[in-house]
Amino acid sequence: MPGPRFLCDAMLGSLARWLRLCGHDCLYLGTEPADAELARIAEAEGRWLLTRDRELAAAGPRTQMVAAGTLEGQLAEVLGRHRLPPPEDLEAARCGECNGALIDVGASEVAADVPPYVLATAERFRRCAGCGRIYWPGTHGEQIHVRFARVRHLMAGSG
Ligand SMILES: [Zn+2]
């Protein structure tokens, strides 16, 4: 079952990246589009528009005002509102950089693109269908798991 899809406004670039790492389809268009254009794109693509701008948040029925000041708080706020599960691991992740889907690939297919010790030790590889970036367990180190744990804690706390 496909989950909700999102579009983050210019102030929520980090949130967009982390929603993708949590496995959610989230568009981020930088600072270029004007508010009206953002609202139009969200509507046209059936996306929830996430914004820190009160006026923009009032622009349509599928908009969400993101109030939390911290990234963890913002993630908990959005996931909670849409009844999405707290992030556990990177199994479902999309590419944090471009929102592309991650495709399983064999070690031989990435041999030229990853450091030798990674090739020798990583158990599996996934390649972004959008930008070609390669992901493997440990790509993001421990930091991502610490952040996911904080989000789980916040979501548990808010019931
Ligand atoms: Zn990508």
Image: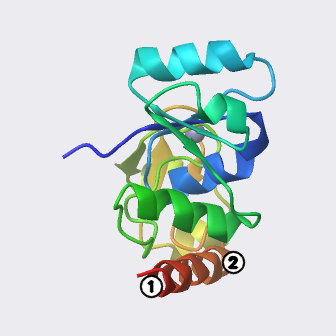
Residue at the limit of the structure toward the left, as seen here: 1
Occupied quadrant, residue 80: bottom left
Q: Which labelled disc corresponds to residue 156?
A: 1
Q: Quadrant of ligand 1?
A: top right
Q: Position of residue 37 (x, y in %)?
A: 64, 13
Q: Which labelled disc corresponds to residue 143?
A: 2
Q: What element carries label 2?
A: helix
Q: Where is residue 29 in the image (x, y as percent from the top left)?
A: 68, 26
Q: Residue at point 50% right, 86% down?
A: 157
Q: Residue at point 42% right, 20% down?
A: 45
Marks 1 and 2 sit apart, C-alpha to C-alpha, by 20 Å
Q: Where is residue 109 in the image (x, y as percent from the top left)?
A: 46, 47
Along the viewing direction, whichever of 146 and 63 lies nearer the viewer: 63
In this rendering, would 64 be left or right of 61?
right
Q: Nearer the viewer, mark 1 or mark 2?
A: 1
Q: Position of residue 107 (x, y in %)?
A: 44, 58
* Marks 1 and 2 in Cβ contact (< 8 Å): no
Q: What element carries label 1?
A: helix
In this rendering, would 29 be left or right of 148?
right
Q: Is residue 132 visible?
A: no
In this rendering, would 159 be left or right of 133?
left
Along the viewing direction, whichever of 31 and 106 lies nearer the viewer: 31
Q: Residue at point 70% right, 64% down?
A: 71
Quadrant where the C terminus lies?
A: bottom left
